[in-house]
Amino acid sequence: MSMPQPVKRLVSGVILDLDGTLLNTDAIVGEVLKVYLAKYDKRWDGRETPKVAGKTPVEAAAAIVEDYGLSCSTEELISEITPMFGDQWSKIKALPGANRLIKHLRGNGVPMALASNSPRESIELKISFHEGWKESFAVIIGGDEVRNGKPSPEIFLAAAKGLELEPSKTMVIEDSLPGVVAGKAAGMEVVAVPSLPKQNHLYTSADVVINSLLDLRPEKWGLPPFQDWVEDTLPIEPWHIGGPVIKGFGRGSKVLGIPTANLSTDGYSELLSEHPSGVFFGWAALSSRGVYKMVMSIGWNPYFNNKEKTIEPWLLHDFEEDFYGELLCLVIVGYIRPEANFPSLEALVEKIHDDRRVAEKALDLPIYSKHRDNPFLRI
Ligand code: ADP
Ligand code: RBF
Ligand code: MG
C-alpha cells in the first residue's frame, strides 16, 4: 500500500506448500488424533500440534507414539489412523486468502507448483474438493515421490525443475519450519506464513514472515500486484459474530480514547480459526440503540502479548455511558492490516487512529455500506 517496500529478489514462479499453507489441515489432524488417543485414555489438547506440523507422516506418527508413550508401533499408528483421515479430507477448509492467491497467480499466468510432504495420492484427493486448484498447478509433487521430504531441499528442487525455472527464480510459500529450511536450502525466496500463533520469531531464516496469505505483496518479488485493495482496505466475504459485551483487560483503552467493547471468544474457536487475526472493520448493532461503524482488532495484541485471543471492536460513535452486558452484533466486511508490535504506546494509539480514519471512509463506499442492511444487525 502506501509504505515503500524493499525490493526482494525477482522471481517468476511460485511453489506452494499445501497443509497449513493453503488448507487448514491442523483442525482435522487435531480432530482425528483426539479420537484416536482417547482409545489409549490419552488427551489431545492441541499443544502437540507443533510436533506434527510440517513433518512427514512417519515423523509425525513417531513423535506421537513417543510423546504419549503409546504401546503401538509407528507403523501401527499410521495404518489405524490413515482411514480415519479418509472421511475428513472433504471437510478441510481453504485458509484465508488461499483461493484469492491461487486465482490471482493463475489469472496472471504465473507458473505454480504444489510441493507437499504428504503422499501424492492424498494431495490429489485433498485439492479435489477445491474448485480450480488442480488445474492451477503445472507441477504437483508429494513426499512419496522424492527420497527425502522437507527439510531436505529435494522436493522444492524437483518442483522448480518441473516448472523449468532456476531455483533462484522461484518463491516458496510455507507455514512450517522444516518447509522454510527446505526452501532456503534450495536457494529460493521463502515467505513464511506460520500456522501457529506467536511463532514468528522462530522463522528467522525466511525472507519474509507474514500473518496470513492476505498480507502477501507479490509485487515485492516482481510478480503482479493484487488489484482488489480498495483505498487501503481489502473487501472480504462478510462474516458475523455477536454476544454480550464483556469486561476486557481494563488497560485504560477508554482513557486513551479508544474504548473497545470486548466480546467473549467462547464457542467461537472454529469461526476464529477460519479468519486470520488482524485489524478489520464493519458494522456493529448494539441492542435497541442502533447500527454504528466499527473498527476492530482480533488477536493477541502483540504490544501487550495477551495469552488469549481477544475480539475488540471500537464503535465509531460517542456514547454517553458504558454498555457492558448489552448484546452487540458485528458484521465484518473488510480487512486493513495484521496486528503489529509498536515501539511505544503512542505509536500504537496513532496507528489505531489511522485505522479508524481508513475504516470510517471505507464504510461510506457502496461495497461496504450495503452491508449495513445485513439481517444479523436487526436486533
Ligand atoms: P475493557 O477493558 O473492559 O474492554 P475499555 O477501556 O476497552 O474497557 O472500555 C470499553 C467499554 O467502554 C465498553 O465495554 C463499553 O461499555 C464502553 N464504551 C463506550 N463507548 C464505546 C465505544 N465507542 N466503543 C466501544 N466501547 C465503548
Ligand atoms: N494491539 C496491538 O498490540 N497491535 C495492534 O496492531 C493493534 N491494533 C489495533 C487496532 C484497532 C482498530 C483496535 C481497536 C485495537 C488494536 N489493538 C492492537 C489492541 C489494543 O492493544 C487494545 O485495544 C488495547 O486495549 C489498547 O489499550
Ligand atoms: Mg476493551
Image (cartoon, rainbow, N blue to C red):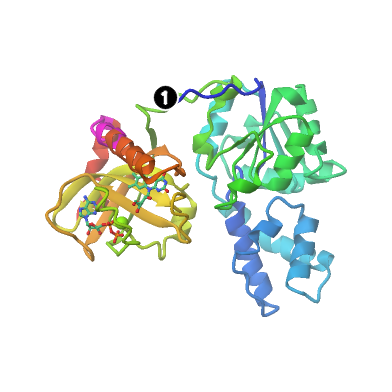
Count every numbered label the image shows and give the total.
1
**Is 59 included in the stretch rendered in magenta?**
no
Quarter assignment of residue 268: bottom left
What residue is rendered at 66% in x and 57% in y? Answer: 50
| Of residues 311 and 18, the one drawn nearer to the viewer in this rendering | 311
Residue position marked by numbered label 1 in the rendering:
2
Position of the C terminus, as image quadrant, is: bottom left
Q: Main secondary structure of the magenta part?
A: helix
Q: Residue at x 57, y 50 (%)?
A: 24
Residue bounds of the magenta highlight: 358-366
Front residue (pair 22, 262): 262
Q: Residue at x 77, y 74 (%)?
A: 70
Residue located farthest toward the bottom when viewing the structure as drawn: 41
In the rendered image, residue 125, in percent from the top left (x then y), is placed at: 67, 47
**Residue 154 shows up from this direction:** yes
Judged left or right of residue 220, residue 79 is: right
